[in-house]
Amino acid sequence: MRAVVQRVNRAAVTVDDVLTGQCQTGFLVYVGVLVGDEVSDAEKLAEKIAGLRIFEDECGKMNHNVRDARGGILAIPNFTLAADTRKGRRPSFGLAARPEEAEKLFDAFVSALTGRGCKVETGRFGAHMIIDSQANGPVNVILDTRPIEG
């Protein structure tokens, strides 16, 4: 699984002009599920994000996680994180998990975050979403549960 985590002052997602999720201080997390990902990947990603220390402490150092900051998480399913752009100009999405499997693993990820004490709201899987956010920093982190090749 892959995720882009953005520290935000606020974030909201709408589908068909209806608000489906939001957070104030916290994380906007885009989540991509790849072929071969398993529930253990969802749990590993949730553990990493719940503990990710990218909020500043009283000394200005990034020492606090989202729970310490009393923040929330807006999780957005995003298959385009599986894009392969190594050849040509049009991304290939052959690495993306099938929608049925990806939705199950996205739900497992959200459940794992909630189980770790995080307040989580989400976008709608498979829908066209409009995301409105205000970045804080900017602080953006890319996470991947797969081993680094090379």
Image (spheres, rainbow, N blue to C red):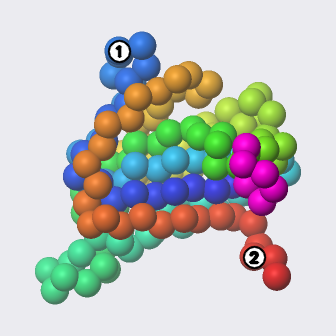
Task: Report the residue at 19% width, 82% height from top.
Answer: 60
Image height of 111 relative to 143, above or below: above
Task: Report the residue at 29% width, 55% height from top.
Answer: 135
Q: Position of residue 107 (x, y in %)?
A: 61, 37
Hey, what amino acid is under mark 1?
A: Asp
Residue furthest front as drawn:
88
Pick the quarter of the image with the N terminus.
bottom right
Task: Tell me if residue 87 is in the magenta stretch.
Answer: yes
Image height of 45 relative to 58, above or below: above
Q: State the residue position of label 2.
A: 148
Pick the quarter of the image with the C terminus.
bottom right
Q: Position of residue 49 (x, y in %)?
A: 49, 62
- Badge 2 marks a residue whose secondary structure is loop
Viewer-proximal residue among 148 and 25: 148
Question: What secondary structure is the stretch in magenta mostly built from?
Answer: loop
Q: State the residue position of label 1.
A: 17
Task: Report the residue at 77% width, 73% height from top.
Answer: 147
Q: Which residues are magenta?
A: 85-90
Hey, what amino acid is under mark 2?
A: Ile
Task: Report the residue at 34% width, 59% height from top.
Answer: 7
Q: Disc 2 and disc 1: Cα gap in Å?
A: 40 Å
